């Protein structure tokens, strides 16, 4: 029987997140020699402590094997129910990002439409002009945040890579290239 820990680690979102963290950790170690030496010492200490703890805990683990097995079965059943209720856990990260972007765009679009409708009544007044300016500012900022923190659509990615200025450079909307590479499969 598979352990609940390995099942959780194999979920697409979890494995992508772990891969992104590992990649960032590796890049940080490579680019900063001082950090590398501290991390190497910490890794060595953790390995030593883990080996000592594992050998010391082995008799206890052997004695508690039936209880651990039962707990694992219950945890796996709980994970089955969780995966059933939250199918997003089984979806590839690029699909989750696309769905999130679409949901946010639709929500922002709905807010824009309702706001414009409400502003229609007060357009000619001073208050209406102030409201319109404020709404434009807020909407502009929300679009900037969407572009910064959520990757572009396939069409936007195509436009970005076809422009001569952007070839060979990181897209401006991807502040975390390791996450983008892992989750979106872009290089």
Image: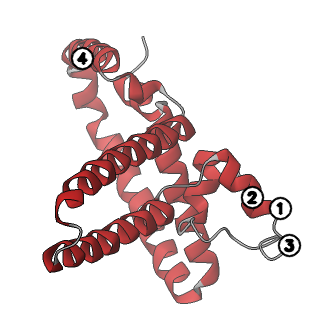
| In-image side of 37 versus 141 (left or right) | right
Task: Tell me the distance, in whole angstroms, between the alpha carbons under discs 1 and 2.
Answer: 5 Å
> Under tag 1, what secondary structure?
helix
Q: Which residue is mark 1?
A: 162
As drawn, 37 above or below 79: below
Q: Which residue is mark 4?
A: 78
As drawn, 63 above or below 23: above
**Residue at the image position 28 percent from the left and 20 percent from the top:** 82
**Residue at the image position 57 percent from the left and 65 percent from the top:** 174
Q: Nearer the viewer, mark 4 or mark 2?
A: 2
> Under tag 4, what secondary structure?
helix
Query: Of the residues under marks 1 and 4, which one precedes in the sequence?
Result: 4
Q: Residue furthest left?
A: 127
Rendering quarter of residue 180: bottom right
User: At which x and y percent is residue 162?
Assistant: 83, 61
Q: Nearer the viewer, mark 1 or mark 4?
A: 1
């Amino acid at each position: 029987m598979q352990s609940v820990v390995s099942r959780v680690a194999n979920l697409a979102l979890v494995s992508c997140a772990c891969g992104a963290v590992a990649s960032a950790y590796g890049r940080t170690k490579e680019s900063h020699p001082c950090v590398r030496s501290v991390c190497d010492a910490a890794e060595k200490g953790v390995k030593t402590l883990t080996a000592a703890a594992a050998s010391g805990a082995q008799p206890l683990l052997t004695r508690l094997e039936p209880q651990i097995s039962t707990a694992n079965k219950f945890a796996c059943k709980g994970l089955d129910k969780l995966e059933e209720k939250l199918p997003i856990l089984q979806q590839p990260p690029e699909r989750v990002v696309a769905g999130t972007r679409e949901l946010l765009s639709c929500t922002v679009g709905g807010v824009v439409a309702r706001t414009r409708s409400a502003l229609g009544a007060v357009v000619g007044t001073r208050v209406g002009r102030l409201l319109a300016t404020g709404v434009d500012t807020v909407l502009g900022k929300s679009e900037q945040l969407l572009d910064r923190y959520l990757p572009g659509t396939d069409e936007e990615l195509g436009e970005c890579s076809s422009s001569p200025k952007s070839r060979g450079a990181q897209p401006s909307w991807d502040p975390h290239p390791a996450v983008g590479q892992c989750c979106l499969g872009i290089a």
